[in-house]
Image (spheres, rainbow, N blue to C red):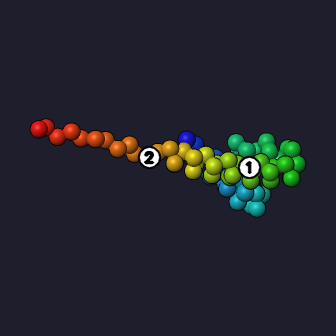
Amino acid sequence: MSKIGGYIAIFGIASIILYFFNYELRILGWIGAWGETTAWIIRIGLVVLGAVLFFIGASGDTEEEVEVQRPE
């Protein structure tokens, strides 16, 4: 889950950065058709959603403790 969240956040950040150079990721090219305000909401939403998924997934990756029984 954390891997997917990381990728989603990276796509959102890349979309924000590329916007200032008048470019857009091909996979997110459709967001410009809905207007500038909606496109910004989607970009920021991608970053927030990706960060949430990343941190939720990272907290679930804890190691389990294993008991070792020694022979008597």
**Label 2: how many Cα within 10 Å (few below 14, some 14–19, many 20+):** few
Comparing 31 with 71, the one in front is 71
**Quarter of the figure with the N terminus:** top right
Q: Which residue is mark 2?
A: 62
Comparing 42 with 48, the one in front is 48
**Quarter of the figure with the C terminus:** top left
Q: Position of residue 21 (x, y in %)?
A: 75, 61
Q: Nearer the viewer, mark 1 or mark 2?
A: 2
Per the image, label 1 sits on a secondary structure element best described as: helix
Outermost residue, left direction? Answer: 72
Distance between the Cα atoms at labels 1 and 2? 27 Å
Comparing 64 with 55, the one in front is 64
Q: Which residue is mark 1?
A: 45
- Residue sitting at 57 percent across and 46 percent down? 56
Outermost residue, front direction? Answer: 72
- Compared with 14, 30 (above or below) is above
- Residue sitting at 77 percent across and 48 percent down? 42
